[in-house]
Amino acid sequence: MINILYIHGLDSSPKPEKIEVLKQYGSVVGLHLDYKKEEDPFKLLNDTILNENISHIVGSSLGGFLGFWLGEKNSLPCLLFNPALGMRSIDVQVERNYNKCPKRLIVLGEQDDVVLPYHTIEFLRPFSRKKTQQEIIIDSTMEHRISDENFVKYVKVLF
């Protein structure tokens, strides 16, 4: 059974359209997080992974940052859209240095002016290792916001 954790970005929410797309592949948990008020979103999400038997992570922006480290910690495949790895506007604490993620697909919007793609690529350089099947896709038409069309397209790549 595939159980997917969908992690939205900063000042966003779990979009029903995106959750419906993910439901085609399994059950979906999409928490609405107020990152500015939530004391420890990493712990909350990690507990959710354990309690809901999560098998895959999909995240975007700040949710992609959290998804990256949660995938590392829990050895889960993940799809990350414009993850705020090299830069972010708020500080969120995570546990680091696990090196256990089995498969990671990272989609970067070349037109993204919020999370600059080259910052993410620089951050990821040390993470290209044999333990992780990692693919980075740079979409020349994509901006920071992920259109429903692009979401569908890249979710199909992961599943």
Image: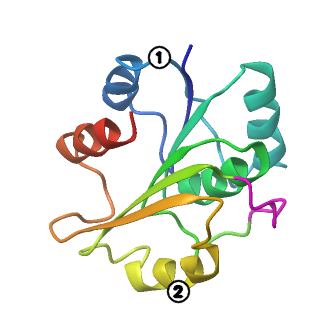
Question: In the rendered image of this protein, does residue 69 appear above or below residue 13?
Answer: below
Image point 50% across, 63% down: which residue?
Answer: 83
User: In this rendering, does residue 142 appear at all?
Assistant: yes
Q: Residue type at mark 2: give it.
A: Glu
Circle number at residue 26: 1
User: In this rendering, does residue 8 appear at all?
Assistant: no
Q: How many labels does the image show?
A: 2
Q: Name the residue nearer the viewer: 146 or 51.
A: 51
Image point 65% across, 45% down: which residue?
Answer: 34
Image point 62% across, 29% down: which residue?
Answer: 55
Q: Name the residue nearer the viewer: 13 or 30.
A: 30
Q: Residue type at mark 1: give it.
A: Gly
Q: Is residue 119 left or right of residue 144?
A: right
Circle number at residue 122: 2
Q: What stretch is highlighted in magenta?
A: 92-100
Q: Position of residue 71 (x, y in %)?
A: 67, 48
Circle number at residue 2: none
Q: Where is residue 157 in the image (x, y as percent from the top left)?
A: 31, 42
Q: Position of residue 53 (x, y in %)?
A: 72, 21
In the rendered structure, does residue 59 fall within the stretch colored magenta?
no
Image point 32% across, 25% down: which residue?
Answer: 21
